[in-house]
Each structure stands twice: as structure tokens, then as C-alpha cells.
Amino acid sequence: MASTLFDPAQFRIPAGVTHVCAGGETAFLLRHDRAFARYAIDKSAGPAGRVAQEAVVERARDLSARLFGVPRESIGFVSSVAEGMSLLVESLDWRDGDNVLLDASEYPSVVAPLSLGLPPGVEIRFAPMHDPGAVAARVHGRTRMLAVSHVSYLHGRRYDLAALRKVADSVGAMLVVDHTQAAGYLPLAAGEADFAFSACYKWLLGMTGTAIAYWNRDRQPDWQPRTAGWYSISGSARPEYGGRPTLKPDAMRFTRGNPSHPSLYVLVEALEYLAAFEARDIQSHVQRLTTALLEHFAASGIPVTTPADPVRHGASVCVATPQADLIVGALEEEAGIYAWGGRGRVRFSFHGYNSIDEVGVVARAMHAVWPRLGHHGSEPDRGQASWFASSQRT
């Protein structure tokens, strides 16, 4: 096999499998076995074990802050991006006439907390986030938030966060970013956002149960959630309930109850593993593979929704088709390829354990499968069609 950046033997990748579904789930590191074992030992060790668990929480904060390029005090943890977004939405003093801007192809974990949590009179507006000029034309003085993924889960487009920051600043709006489809292979500068989140079970090589939450305390110094729990309030003494409890002064106010200690043990192992590599080396490796697959598909006439320019895409190549799940099944059965389906597209996502040879494996398999399955079946629903249409506008 041609050179990989990571040693595939350090991951649980079955023999003969081409694992290109990092945008859904990455292969698990073998070293996570010792993370689970260490957690089991610490959990069983009484008070001293709880002290050890909290030390892991702090280590995870240190590593997450380094990853995000922000101070450790600005990092907390939530169970998922959806929980973090929900906590943020419910904390803000929305007023009649306010609005929020989203891309029509945004991920549900960002959209659903707004759709269900905003009070009547607050509007959700849509704009193509890859076109900052079009976004600027949609905002005004009552725009409170621009919410966007760093990289789209649907079509693999990377958004210009610095440009969106300028648009937000032009009307005094906050910028909220979901880094899930970027963290782990793209260098991050999370400080451009007012708030940011990332799930940990994709390119970060962790697992579900924990998502990283970032609070920009310089931009939003007075922020506080409307709900709390024992973990998010200050002090360890027996609380006096006659008054309002004081929240922790830093971003651990995001974490209302016990953090998910097992997933944080795993996250520490994962982030320490990733820290052995330069972020730009990981980016260069995965985007070389992404670009190569885009070139293969262009030569084969397989339509993609991912921009060809490496500056505009992430680590995924997306092919729009209503037969996505059938194609994913055929690729696994006939060629041993783990890809990702659903949402009206097939997605191929690379990480450091993939090689250029595997790009060829995927290209040849799709060349065989596409004529048989790619053009058959019903059309995607109108929502999917509009998402893909908006992704292609320039």
C-alpha cells in the first residue's frame, strides 16, 4: 500500500477493508482499549478515583484548547453539538423581529434547536453561506446570529469563516460554528466565533458522549445559560438555596451534570495521538486524497457536489444520488469499501490512515457500480434537491 500518514495497524480496520467514512464514523484506535481500562480502574477507586477522573477532564480541556487555538478557560464539554446549541439558544434574550441566518443545507443539530427553541416572532432566514456577499445582503440590524458548519456534512464545501465573521460584525450579530466536519484534519482558529462546538467521533478519533464547547469570553463576556446543574455551579460546599446559585466562571458552565468521563478518557488518547502530527500535514494528506478522487470522478462522469478547489472543500467527496444507500451496500459487499450514505448522497471521507492506492480502489468500484445503480430510482425529495441546488450556486 502506498504511504499513509497514520499507521493503519493502530486502528480497528478489518483486513481487506477500505475505510473511507470518516465523515460518519472513523475507525477506532487500538490504544482506546487502555483508556477504557484506565477509566474502569479509576471509577472503582473511590474518592481518589474521582480525583483521577477530574484530572482527565482537565487534560481533555488542555488538549481541546490547543486544538481550537483558544484559552483553556474557554473550553467546556456537552454531550453533543445539539445539546450545546440548545443550551445556547435557550440562553439568549430573543425579541420579536430578530432573525437568524443559516445555509439551506445546514446540519440538523444546528438547525433543530433553533427551529424548536426560538420564540414566535423570531425568523429563521436562509442564505448561501459560501457566498459572503449574498449573506451580507440578507442581514440587517435585527440579525442576532449566523450559524454555520465549518465544512458541510452534505456536500463537503468548506466555508470562509473569516469572511462570515466580517458580515456578522457589520450588524453586531454573533457567529456560531460547528467544527465537527473539520476538527481533526483542518487547523482551527475557533476564536473567530462567539461560540463553537465539535463532536468528537469523526476526525477527532474519539467517540460519542462528549462534544467540545467553546465560549468566546472576550466577545460574549456576560453570557450565561438559563439552566444549570451541580457541576456547572461554583463551589463544593453544601449549597444554600435561598439565593441564585453562582455559575462557574469559565466554559465548564456548559457542563450541567457529570461530564461523560469514559468518552473523555478516549478523547484524551485521541487528541494526544493527533498532537503527534502537524495539523497542516493531516490537512495536506487528506486533501490530496480528496482532490485525487474528485479528479477520478470527473474523468468517469460521476457527478459530485463537492467543489474541486482544495481551498473550498474539506476531506469528503459527495455524490448526489437517490440510490445512495444501495450504492453504499454494493460498495461494501463487492469491494470491501466502507463509505457513508443517507441524505440523498454517497460520501467518501478520508483520514490519515488512508492512502492514494485506496483512492484508486474507490474510483474503480464506483466506476463499476455507478452505471448500474447511480441513475435509477426516484428523485430526492424537494428538501434534498434544494440543498444540492444551493450548494452548486456560485
Image (tube, rainbow, N blue to C red):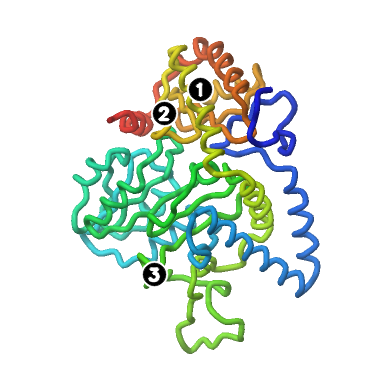
Report whether residue 207 is seen: no
Relative placement, left or right, of 196 versus 15 is: left
Q: How many angstroms separate mark 2 from mark 3 (CA)?
A: 36 Å
Q: Amino acid at mark 1?
A: Ala
Q: Amino acid at mark 3?
A: Trp
Q: Which residue is mark 3?
A: 223
Residue 288, given in percent of the width and then of the height, sits at: 52, 28
| Residue 175, quarter of the rendered image | bottom left
- Say if 344 sits above or below 81 in the image: above
Q: Nearer the viewer, mark 2 or mark 1?
A: 1
> Which residue is identified by label 1?
292
* Mark 2 surroundings: few (<14), some (14-19) or many (≥20) residues within 10 A: many
In depth, the one of 372 and 336 nearer the eye is 336
Residue at label 2? 306
Up/down of 312 relative to 252, above or below:
above
Query: Which of pointers 2 and 3 lies earlier in the amino acid sequence?
Result: 3
